[in-house]
Amino acid sequence: MRRSLWFVLLVALLALPLAAEEPSLLYVRAGRLLDVKTGRVSTDQVIVIRGERIERVGPAADIRIPADARVINLGRATALPGLIDVHGHLTGDHRFHGYRGLSISVPRSALYGALNARKTLEAGFTSLRNVGADGYADVALRDAINDGEMAGPRLQVSGPALGITGGHCDENLLPSEYRHRSLGVADGPWAVRAKVREVIKYGADLIKFCATGGVLSKGDDVGVQQYELEEMRAIVDEAHKLGRKVAAHAHGTAGIKAAIQAGVDSIEHASLIDDEGVRLARERGTFLAIDIYNDTFILSKGAEMGMLPESLEKERQIGQLQRDNFRRAHRGGARIAFGTDGGVYPHGDNALQFAYMVQYGMTPLEAIQAATLNAAELMGWQDRVGALEPGYFADLIAVEGDPLVDVTSLERVRFVMKGGKIYRDELGAR
Ligand SMILES: [Zn+2]
């Protein structure tokens, strides 16, 4: 008996430091809180945060804040969930397009990737899907952010994108004597399965592949299908079997439909989607991530940033069509997730796309839902980000004014919190 008593005491003593490390409580007072599910704005709300997660949300009248509590006061600003971009390239940089990119090493790209991650977070994007990076720099970035070594959004990363030899996801700038090909190149159903296994081995959270040609690649036609349906099916089957979602880069009409039929989770760009493609996407629940801001950057600054003349020509061909087809897809009932292709344009400018989404047919609330609820669902993170509810990560932002009236207020995010930690505070909220 006595021995067991000592044992109980010892266990209790050992448990003491654990008890002392219980996550601290934090109270955020929000003068205006936007519920992105309903579009309702509630006034005088309190968000109770324990550690990195939300414990409770409710009216200030119902939640007693202890006198010695840590309180963040957002004043009259409008609080909403942290934004999510499902298509970015943090280790890509808008200054190094075309041949300039060849002089950038993978370690160098990881270093400015760290800078870009911080810029993106400070702009209010607390989660991001990184779809395509050289040399697994994105995996390193994700892990460094998760380990608290640097500031950045919560990341899902794809590693190198799969693509056919000479396709959009290959590197076609050098002649054959350099024997250069991108890490993600694989041709044929079994080779693509092996490639899926390989990128997962080295840390990919999702699989990205190139179904059609692209704008910023040399020597391919943006509208032409690249992978065969059989290869796409093999990629999707292997990825889903291994628990990974699949994002397909697809501009061309036929390639978009083949990718949807193959069962991908999202179509990236979707520039030349037709009514049948929209219907297929709607029926299959395939998300579309249509990047309708960056056309403005490519056509105004692309040449200065090293983009090839043929890339600018391709953009002139499809840029406006893509915007018109965004309207078509939205009207046709396809689900849209907010994806911008950051890295083509300067990181941190992600929110510039909201105004275009509204110009091309969405309400401000729908555009915000694309960047919260829909993006979270596409990432499979609908139980942890994209809403401010108990159990979710304390990822929230605040803007002055009403984003439902003026969606461009999201371009001027004044407060950013991720996991209960503040990364931007221009409201004097602390
Ligand atoms: Zn991209």
Image (tube, rainbow, N blue to C red):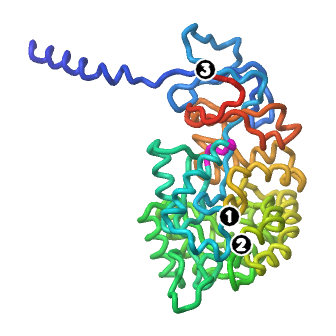
Q: Confirm whether residue 256 shows in the render.
A: no
Q: What residue type is labelled 2?
A: Gly
Q: Do the residues labelled 2 and 3 touch (CB within 8 Å)?
A: no
Instruction: Point out residue 356 in the picture as x, y percentages from the top left corner.
Output: 85, 54
Res. 63 image quadrant: top right
Question: Disc 3 marks which amino acid?
Answer: Tyr
Query: Over which residues does the magenta segment extend?
Result: 123-127
Query: Marks 2 and 1: CB-CB under 8 Å?
Result: yes
Q: Mark 2 sits on what residue?
A: 306
Between label 2 and label 3, give the one nearer the viewer.
2
Residue at image position (87%, 50%) is: 358
Q: Is residue 188 left or right of residue 318?
A: left
Considering the whole magenta stretch, tell me its main secondary structure. Answer: strand
- The reply, left or right, for residue 1 in relation to residue 115 is left
| Quarter of the picture holding the N terminus | top left
Which residue is the site of mark 1?
95
Whether the magenta-drawn stretch holds residue 427 is answered as no
